[in-house]
Image: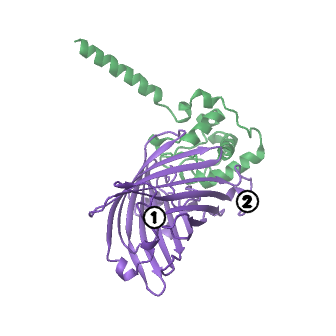
Chain colours: A purple, B green
Amino acid sequence: MFFLLYAGGSRGAEGPFFITYTHQMEEPGNLELTTKAVTGSPDGGNGFIAAAAEFEYGIKAWWTTEVYLDGQSTPAESTIFTGYRWENRFRMLSREHWINPVLYLEFEDINGADKTLLEVVGHDGEEDLIAPNDEARREKQREIEAKLILGSYFKGWTIAENFIAEKNLGHEPYEFGYAAGISRPLALAATPDRCELCRENFQAGVEVYGGLGTHSDFGFRGTSQYIAPTLGWTSAGGIMLRVSTGFGVTTTSAPVLVRFSVTYELSQFGRTMRKAFDMGGDQK
Amino acid sequence: MKIFRAGVVLIFISLIHAAERKGTPVQQAPAKYVQLQNPFEGTQSAAQAGQKLFARECAACHGKNAGGIGKAPPLVTPDVSRAAPGALFWVLRNGSMKRGMPSFAHLPEPQRWQIVSYLKSLGPLSQLSVH
């Protein structure tokens, strides 16, 4: 129904990254819809495709909340729903600085068959992707995750670093990870005319991410590490497509992970809903 | 008594400080930004590009013709038309958390200046048919 009521879209602003968060927040009242998928073929296991549906909403200029619904399909095994995540991001400084911190807090209730790989922490590795769905889905992963997101914009470049700490609410150790990325639009100035394939609509970058072990075994030993060139394109109508190929650089990593996503932002969704349900929203 | 006086003075200073921080976001722009020159000054194509960017980034809140919607103020006002280009650039960079305006620092600097060019081309409300 809301698509019928909805007035128009605008452009998502998070750049071409899949794993790395920038300090860019969702605009208040906007709802961003994203489908992120990842496919891989781990050695010794079946190929898979996993996807996450994201619903990101700007509550305040300093507070963004997001819900994920995860699932995956492994041919010759099954297609299953693997859980949900609820994240909140809080911008910590009101103005723009050289380095801009954002605090990220997430609760996730997923199972061991989740292969969306939205972050890599601890000693996550290729063997996690090999376990058969029937077996892996029995493992409950109720986890709290915190990230410190640091972001900067410099002469058209977007630079972001994330430090991740994750704790399974069961009897698991604290796990750590990181992600970092750099990207840039292919043109910094906009052309006067509406265009689809002009350079300003493309963003290219690279991100690196991986685990940092646990609190008792901190470091790179036995962890997965990836380097992933990324490319994003935004249509004049506001739909953003992203694609990335991640290459595992340690023996623990999956050799290749191909990711793609589609994003569309519903501008002022909150206002539209308030009007639709006559909840005393903003008046002209 | 001394503590009471000191408290009054502190409250007074705080009020002055708070008053200094009041005003529109444009009025809060630091001097070093106010002095910045728009590299696209007087370029018609920059204003056109800015119009395209405005439609994509700003119109959902401020209205298609910048006339304002709800809490998002109109931008076809004397405050904006008389503002230094650098002050508008500073507002786009920082937003105003207090007023619910996000930062647009993710836009490359040339694109922010193009939006400034467009805003400066609008003029005050009386010259436009808003909505």
Q: Quadrant of residue A10?
A: bottom right
Residue drawn at (65%, 43%), measured in percent from left and top? A155
- Res. A283 visible in picture: no
Q: Say which chain tag 1 marks.
A: A
Q: Quadrant of residue A279?
A: bottom left
Residue drawn at (61%, 62%), measured in percent from left and top? A230
Note whether A99 is above or below A260 in the view shown: above
Q: Residues within 10 Å of mark 1 (few under 14, many from 20)?
A: some
Q: Between B89 and B119, which is closer to the camera in this rendering?
A: B89
Q: Residues within 10 Å of mark 2 (few under 14, many from 20)?
A: some
Q: Say which chain tag 2 marks.
A: A
Which numbered tag is attached to residue A198? 2
Note whether A42 is above or below A214 in the view shown: below
Residue beneath label 1, please? A55
Q: Earlier in the sequence, mark 2 or mark 1?
A: 1
Q: Between A209 and B13, which is closer to the camera in this rendering?
A: A209
Q: Amino acid at mark 1?
A: Phe
Q: For this view, does A75 lie left or right of residue A154?
A: left
Helix, strand or loop at mark 2: loop
